[in-house]
Image (cartoon, rainbow, N blue to C red):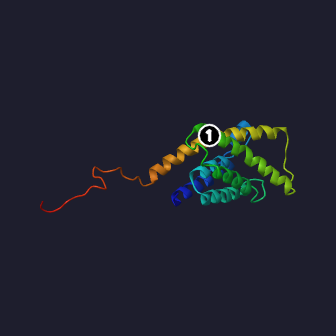
Amino acid sequence: MNWLHTILILTVAFLAVFGQATFNGVRHLIGAQVDLLPSLIVYASLSSGLTTLALLAVCGGLWLDSVSANPLGISVLPLFVVGLLINHFRGLILREQRFAQVVLGMAASAAVPVLTLLLLINTGNKPLIGWFSLWQWLVMSLAGGAVTPLWFRFFDWIVGALSYQSLGETSFRSDREIKRGRS
């Protein structure tokens, strides 16, 4: 892809992290924080290259950790691993199917917190885990699955609006021979 697409993805990731850290209405209403980065990782891994995926995992993970109670950088590896796995099998995934987008969004939104939790436990941190954590994990997974198709629609619309659209074929064929002069 081009750099415009990468810049748009990173800008949306920054705004998503800022929004979920600033606006607490959803968190107070349903009792769980919705994480939008795993669903955005699904979009980036299916729609762009490895460079964009790595930039999103590093920048998004660091932005998320800087506004949360996580140690700085703990979210980068789970985001990158999930994105790399999806990117590796993207030739087999039906990118345009809404069902596939929802399932991948749910799987990524379920896997990233679990991998982050495993990293936290293995680094000697003591995260607060209880039965309510299952509710939060379920809400995060369902919300990630619901948001993923919206990313595909949004970015298809934005890239279509801001990118150069090539013209269709003209009435003259490229293999047509034009004879000039007197005959």
Q: Position of residue 145 (x, y in %)?
A: 65, 40
Residue at the spot 61% in from the left edge and 43% down from the top edge = 148
Find disc 1 in the rendering and name its residue. 100
Res. 104 image quadrant: top right
Q: Nearer the viewer, residue 163 or 174?
A: 174
**Residue 32, placed above or below residue 41:** above
Tally of numbered discs: 1
**Amino acid beneath label 1:** Ala
Q: Residue furthest front?
A: 183
Which residue is more in the foreground, 28 or 169? 169
> Residue shown at 68%/51% (left/top)?
85
Residue 3 visible, this angle: yes
Q: Is the residue 66 above or below the residue 133 in the image?
A: below
Q: Position of residue 126 (x, y in %)?
A: 87, 52
Q: Residues within 10 Å of mark 1 (few under 14, many from 20)?
A: some
Q: Is residue 92 left or right of residue 132?
A: left
Identified at 12% across, 61% down, the residue is: 182
Identify the element where label 1 is drawn: helix
Is residue 18 visible to the viewer in this orientation of the structure? no
Residue 27 location (% of width, % of height): 71, 41
Quadrant of the snapshot with the C terminus: bottom left
Does residue 38 appear left or right of residue 181 in this picture? right
